[in-house]
Amino acid sequence: MADADVATKAPESDAQENVIPGDTPAQTGPTMGEHCTSDRPTPAGLAPKGEFRKLGGVDVYLTKPDSYPSNPSKLLLLLSSGTGIKSTNNQIQADKFANEGFVVVMPDLFEGNPAPNSSLASDSEFEGTSFLDKIKLKAAEIAKSFVIDEWLARHTEEKVMPILEKVVEACNGEFADAVGNGGGIYAVGYCFGGRYILLLASEHQKVQTGWSGAQKPADEEAGEGTGSVKKGPFIKAGALAHATLVSPDDFQGIKVPVSLVCVESDPMFPDDVREAGEDILSKESVEHEVQVYPGVPHGFAVIGDYDDEHIKDAQITAYEQMLRWVKEH
């Protein structure tokens, strides 16, 4: 199996020179790579076993241990990449955790609107093409990037967090036995969903507003204090793999143990952001672990077939890291 390295900062020149089989070129701005928006081939012989249903008014993929509810289980949220709950690979990923004793709820974070495929044209696609064809291919590449950014603008934190809060509330009701057995809700997230593990693990101040949107004046007698209330954390422990769209601020306020699976020199989760996050977690004495995997593409930890044995082994190791974390906490 692949050995994950302790987090270290790689020179920018290395990030540009390293070419990982199956990886995508670096993109700039608030966007995502191909591995966040399209699936690898599904491994032969695997098929989903769960079901689609509504939970708290939200579409979810639900999968359970064969022995549930006869035997006690724990509740796990799985937050997917941009491919969403209809992705066969994401469903199989959820099933793997269910086989380990978790009732797994994978919510539709995108309200039926998963990310469009954002695969970029490779250098080989430009070989042997005319100057005009090269211009057309580049224009198509720019258009794909624009479509992804437009999609992201429709699926912001302000849209996604209320969906998750509805699901958390519904889980606490319908699956109270599993939540109680685990002493809370566990969560794992990949790519787009990875950032929301950090947000679910955090305590935030929510300013109370009146109908006009203006902050309510403090009411000492009513106990409103400064007009803000604390929300979160919503989970007991979380693990995330190759998160995207993360900023150092997302590590502020984290109160529960978190485990991070990271890709070496990952343009989607830059070293400086990861290291800033580690510093914040350490200063706040938050239990955490960070493992950096070299020689793998962004998105490698999600179920999917690769020809490269190193990537296959790293995928297994990353899953074991995340599973161990939620089991031990």
Image (cartoon, rainbow, N blue to C red):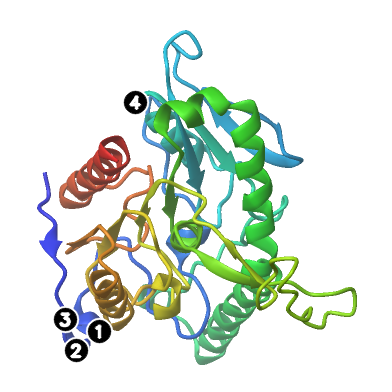
Give the answer, above or below, for where 99 lies relative to 293.
above
| Callout 4 touching callout 3 (CB < 8 Å) | no
Of marks 1 and 3, which one's residue comes earlier in the chain?
3
Do the CB atoms of the residues marked 2 and 1 lie less than 8 Å apart?
Answer: yes
Q: Position of residue 312 (x, y in %)?
A: 22, 45
Q: Amino acid at mark 2?
A: Ser
- As shown in the figure, which amino acid type bears the numbered disc 3? Ala
Please state which of residues 59 and 264 is positioned toward the viewer in this rendering: 59
Task: Report the amino acid beneath label 1.
Answer: Gln
Q: Residue furthest front?
A: 221
Q: Position of residue 120 (x, y in %)?
A: 48, 72
Residue drawn 52% across the image and 37% down it: 88
Report the residue marked by disc 4: 100
Quarter occupied by residue 259: bottom left
Q: Earlier in the sequence, mark 4 or mark 3?
A: 3
The residues tagged by marks 4 and 3 sit, at their Cα atoms, a distance apart of 35 Å
Tag 2 and tag 3, C-beta contact below 8 Å: no
| Amino acid, disc 4 | Glu
Mark linked to residue 13: 2
Which structural element holds mark 3?
loop
Decide: few, some or many residues near mark 4? Use Cα within 10 Å; few <14, some 14-19, many ≥20: some
